Image (spheres, rainbow, N blue to C red):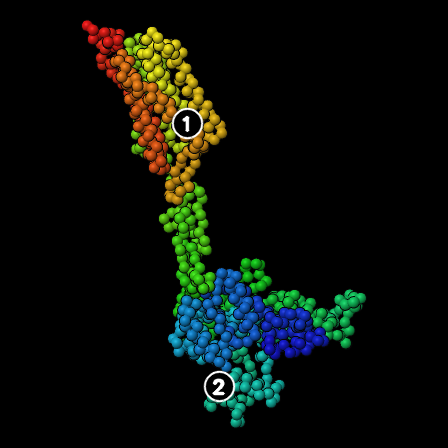
C-alpha cells in the first residue's frame, strides 16, 4: 500500500494497537510513534533519500542541480530535506518545481530547465506519467544533455513511456530499494495452472501474455495476442523461459510484501514458542495463543529478527522500519525501445560510516556516450591561486574568482579563502604555494659588499702602515712636533675604526647587531676626542709662549691624556647603558615582496641618536677650537689640517643624514659603511698624509730648522 492508502488504515488500527506492516508507504509522517504507534514498514522512510541523494551528488561533484517532483505531500518533504542536505555538502538547488496536470506547471518546469543551462543534473521525484508529459514539453524545446537522477518514487516501465521520454531518460540514474530472493516463488510460478483460478480475468490475461495464445470469444483477447495466435486451452505449462517476463530480480514491491508477511509470521512463531514464566509481559507471562491481544502481537512484531536466504538480517529499527539498501541503477534504453537497468552501485545503511556509498564508475554509461560523469556547476571552478567571491543575490554555488591578495595563496581549486604565507615566505608566481623569501643583506659575495670590504681592509692596513712609519720615525721633529703620543692614539683608534665596517657587512647576527654601533661610536669618539686634544694642545702651546698667559698651566703633559679618556668614558657609558637596556637585535623586514631584508633594529632610537649627537658635538667643538687657530704661524700649521679634517667629517656626516633616510634595505648599511670609511679616511688623509709626504719623500725638511723656520733666516 502507498502512503495515501495506508494513512486512514493506520489511524484506525492505531486506536486498538493492531500491528500494521506496510511494504510501500514511505512518507516520513509514519515515523511519528505517538500518532501511529502500531505502524511498521519494511521500506525505509523517504526522509532518508535526501541524505542518500546528497551523498550521490557529492560523490560526482554536482553542486548545481535542479529538483522536479510530482505535486504531493511526499515531494514537499523531499524538497525541504533535500535542499538542506545538498546545502550541507556544499551544493545548491538551482530550481525546484512541482508537476501537476491541473495547471501549466509542466510548461513552467520545462522553461526553468531550458533557462538554467548550467544545471545539467536534475533530480526527479515524480510519477512516470508526469515525467512522460514533461519529456514531451522538453522535446519541443530541443532540450538535450541533461542527466536525470530518479528517486524511488519513479517506476520505470518502458511500455508506458513514450519514445521521447525513453530517449530523455536514457543513461540516467535511479535510486531503487534493493529486492531479494523469495524462497519457493519460482517454484510457485512454475506450478501455476489456470484451472486453479477459474473465472479469474487477470489470470486469463496473464496466461495470454505468457503463452502467446488467445481465448476464444469476444473481448477476451489482449492487445498483445495477435489474430494468428492459437487458442488458449489452460493446460499449457509454465517453463523457466516464461519467468523472464516476471523480471524476478526487479520485484521490489513484491519482495517488501514478502518481508512484511515473513515478519508477521516470525512474530506469531515467537509468540507461540513462549515458555510459561519466561514471557515478556507483566509477571513474566506469555500471551494466550488462542486469544492473543493486538498489543501483544505488536510487541512480538516489533522484536522480530531473522535472516533471509540471501543472508540479509531483517529487523525493525527504533523508527519501526527495516534498514534498506539502495541500489543505484543506470537506465539504458535499447534500440528496440526496451530498457534495462544495470546496477552500478549501492548505498548500505549497515556499512561503517564513510563506506556506505559504493559506485563502480566504469560501469556507468553517461548521456552522449561519455565515460566520465558530466559537470553540473553554476560556474567554472576557481583555479589555484584564486578564491571564491560571493555574488550579491545569488546562491553560494554561484560566485566569481578573485586573485589571492599579496602575500597569500590558495593550494586547491575553489578555495573559499586564501591563506597567508608564513612570515619569511612569499607566494610563487601562480600564488599556489609559499616559497622562502630571498634574504637580502650586504653580503661579501656581491660587488658592493666586496668593494667596501676591500676598501675597509686597505684603509686598516694603511692606518697600520702610517702608525708604523710614525713609530719608526718617532725621534724626528715632525713626529715629535705635536705630541706624538696623541698621534699614536689617533692612528690606533682609526685602525680599529676601519675594522668596524666588517661588523656591518655579512648576515647580521645577535652579537654583531649588539656591538657594531657601539664599537664604532666608542672608537670614533676616541678619534674625535684625540683630534680635539691635539687642537687644544696646539692652541695652548702657542699662547703659552707669552709670559703672562694663564694657559701655561694647561700646556703640561696632563692635558693630552685627560681629554680622550674623559670624552671616551662618556660615550662608553652611554653605549653600555644602551646595550644593557635596549640592545639592538637582528630583524627581518615585513614589507610585502619576495625578499626579506635582514637588518638590525637599533633597540632605542633615542640612544642611537644620542650617540651620534655626542660625536657631532665633539666634532663641532674641535672645529670651533681649530678654526680660529688656522692662521697661526707655519710652525704650528697642524691647526689648518685639523680644521680641514673636521670640515671633511662634517660634510660627510651632514650628507649621511638624507642618504640614510632615503636608502632602503641593504643600501642603508652601505651608506653607514661608506660614511665610516669616508670620515675616517678624511681624518687620516688631512692629518697624516702631509707628514708622511715629508717623512718619506722629503726627509731633508724633517729637521728642527725647518720646523722652527730658521731656514728663512739664513
Category of crowding for the residue at label 1, using alpha-carbon neighbours closer than 10 angstroms: few (below 14), some (14–19), many (at least 20): many
Quadrant (top left, top right, bottom left, bottom right) of the C terminus: top left
162 over 56 or under it: above or below: below
What SS does tag 2 mark? Answer: loop
Horizontal and vertical percent position of residue 289: 76, 74
As drawn, which residue projects farthest toward the bottom? 218
Quadrant (top left, top right, bottom left, bottom right) of the N terminus: bottom right
371 over 506 or under it: above or below: below
What SS does tag 1 mark? Answer: helix
Category of crowding for the residue at label 2, using alpha-carbon neighbours closer than 10 angstroms: few (below 14), some (14–19), many (at least 20): few
Horizontal and vertical percent position of residue 339: 46, 75
Upstream in sequence: badge 1 or badge 2 = 2
**Residue 358: in sight, yes or no?**
no
Whether residue 43 sits left or right of residue 133 in the image: it is right
Horizontal and vertical percent position of residue 234: 57, 87
304 over 635 or under it: above or below: below
**Residue 501: in sight, yes or no?**
yes
Q: Which residue is mark 1?
A: 611
Whether residue 475 sits left or right of residue 58 in the image: it is left
Q: Looking at the rendering, which quadrant does residue 521 occupy?
A: top left
Question: How much space separates mark 1 and mark 2, taking CA atoms?
Answer: 112 Å
Amino acid at each position: 500500500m502507498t502512503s495515501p492508502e495506508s494513512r486512514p488504515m493506520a489511524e484506525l488500527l492505531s486506536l486498538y494497537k493492531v500491528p500494521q506492516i506496510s511494504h510501500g508507504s514511505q512518507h516520513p509522517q509514519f515515523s511519528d510513534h505517538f500518532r501511529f504507534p502500531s505502524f511498521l514498514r519494511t521500506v525505509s522512510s523517504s526522509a532518508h533519500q535526501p541524505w542518500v541523494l546528497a551523498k550521490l551528488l557529492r560523490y560526482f561533484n554536482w553542486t548545481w542541480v535542479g529538483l522536479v517532483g510530482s505535486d504531493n505531500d511526499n515531494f514537499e518533504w523531499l524538497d525541504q530535506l533535500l535542499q538542506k542536505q545538498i546545502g550541507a555538502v556544499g551544493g545548491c538547488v538551482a530550481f525546484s518545481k512541482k508537476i501537476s496536470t491541473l495547471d501549466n506547471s509542466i510548461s513552467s518546469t520545462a522553461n526553468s530547465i531550458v533557462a538554467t543551462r548550467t544545471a545539467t543534473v536534475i533530480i526527479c521525484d515524480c510519477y512516470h506519467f508526469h515525467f512522460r508529459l514533461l519529456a514531451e514539453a522538453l522535446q519541443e524545446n530541443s532540450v538535450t544533455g541533461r542527466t536525470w537522477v530518479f528517486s524511488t518514487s519513479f517506476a520505470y516501465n518502458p511500455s508506458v513511456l513514450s519514445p521521447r521520454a525513453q530517449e530523455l531518460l536514457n543513461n540516467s540514474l535511479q535510486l531503487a530499494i534493493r529486492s531479494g530472493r523469495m524462497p519457493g516463488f519460482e517454484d510457485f510460478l512454475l506450478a501455476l495452472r489456470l484451472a486453479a483460478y477459474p473465472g479469474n480475468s487477470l489470470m486469463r490475461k496473464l496466461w495470454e501474455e505468457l503463452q502467446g495464445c488467445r481465448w476464444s470469444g469476444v473481448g477476451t483477447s489482449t492487445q498483445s495476442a495477435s489474430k494468428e495466435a492459437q487458442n488458449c486451452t489452460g493446460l499449457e505449462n509454465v517453463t523457466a523461459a516464461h519467468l523472464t517476463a516476471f523480471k524476478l530480480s526487479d520485484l521490489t514491491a513484491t519482495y517488501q510484501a514478502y518481508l512484511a508477511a515473513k515478519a508477521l509470521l516470525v512474530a506469531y512463531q515467537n509468540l507461540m514458542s513462549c515458555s510459561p514464566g519466561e514471557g515478556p509481559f507483566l509477571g513474566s507471562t506469555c500471551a494466550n495463543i488462542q486469544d492473543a491481544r493486538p498489543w501483544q502481537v505488536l510487541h512480538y512484531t516489533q522484536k522480530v529478527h531473522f535472516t533471509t536466504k540471501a543472508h540479509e538480517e531483517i529487523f525493525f529499527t527504533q523508527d519501526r522500519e527495516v534498514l534498506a539498501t539502495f541500489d543505484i541503477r543506470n537506465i539504458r534504453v535499447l534500440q528496440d525501445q526496451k530498457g534495462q537497468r544495470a546496477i552500478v552501485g549501492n548505498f548500505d545503511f549497515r556499512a561503517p560510516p564513510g563506506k556506505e556509498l559504493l559506485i563502480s564508475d566504469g560501469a556507468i554509461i553517461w548521456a552522449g556516450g561519455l565515460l566520465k560523469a558530466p559537470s553540473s556547476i553554476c560556474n567554472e571552478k576557481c583555479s589555484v591561486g584564486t578564491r571564491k567571491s560571493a555574488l550579491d543575490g545569488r546562491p553560494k554555488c554561484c560566485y566569481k574568482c578573485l586573485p589571492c591578495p599579496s602575500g597569500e595563496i590558495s593550494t586547491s581549486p575553489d578555495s573559499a579563502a586564501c591563506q597567508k604565507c608564513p612570515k619569511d615566505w612569499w607566494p610563487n608566481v601562480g600564488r599556489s604555494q609559499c616559497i622562502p623569501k630571498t634574504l637580502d643583506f650586504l653580503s661579501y659575495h656581491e660587488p658592493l659588499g666586496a668593494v667596501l670590504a676591500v676598501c675597509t681592509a686597505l684603509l686598516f692596513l694603511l692606518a697600520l702602515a702610517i702608525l708604523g712609519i710614525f713609530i719608526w720615525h718617532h725621534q724626528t721633529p715632525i713626529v715629535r712636533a705635536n705630541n706624538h703620543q696623541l698621534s699614536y692614539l689617533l692612528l690606533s683608534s682609526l685602525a680599529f675604526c676601519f675594522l668596524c665596517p666588517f661588523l656591518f657587512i655579512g648576515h647580521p647576527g645577535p652579537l654583531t647587531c649588539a656591538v657594531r654601533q657601539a664599537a664604532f661610536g666608542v672608537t670614533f669618539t676616541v678619534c674625535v676626542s684625540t683630534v680635539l686634544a691635539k687642537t687644544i694642545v696646539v692652541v695652548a702651546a702657542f699662547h703659552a709662549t707669552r709670559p703672562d698667559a694663564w694657559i701655561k698651566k694647561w700646556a703640561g703633559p696632563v692635558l693630552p691624556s685627560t681629554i680622550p679618556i674623559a670624552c671616551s668614558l662618556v660615550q662608553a657609558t652611554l653605549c653600555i647603558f644602551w646595550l644593557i637596556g635596549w640592545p639592538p637585535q637582528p630583524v627581518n623586514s615585513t614589507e610585502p615582496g619576495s625578499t626579506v631584508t635582514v637588518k638590525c633594529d637599533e633597540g632605542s632610537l633615542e640612544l642611537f641618536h644620542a650617540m651620534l649627537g655626542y660625536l657631532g658635538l665633539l666634532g663641532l667643538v674641535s672645529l670651533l677650537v681649530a678654526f680660529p687657530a688656522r692662521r697661526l704661524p707655519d710652525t704650528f700649521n697642524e691647526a689648518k689640517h685639523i680644521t680641514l679634517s673636521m670640515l671633511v667629517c662634517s660634510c660627510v656626516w651632514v650628507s649621511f643624514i638624507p642618504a640614510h633616510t632615503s636608502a632602503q634595505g641593504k643600501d642603508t648599511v652601505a651608506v653607514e659603511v661608506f660614511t665610516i670609511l669616508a670620515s675616517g679616511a678624511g681624518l687620516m688623509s688631512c692629518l697624516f698624509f702631509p707628514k708622511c709626504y715629508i717623512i718619506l719623500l722629503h726627509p731633508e725638511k724633517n729637521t728642527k730648522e725647518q720646523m722652527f723656520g730658521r731656514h728663512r733666516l739664513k
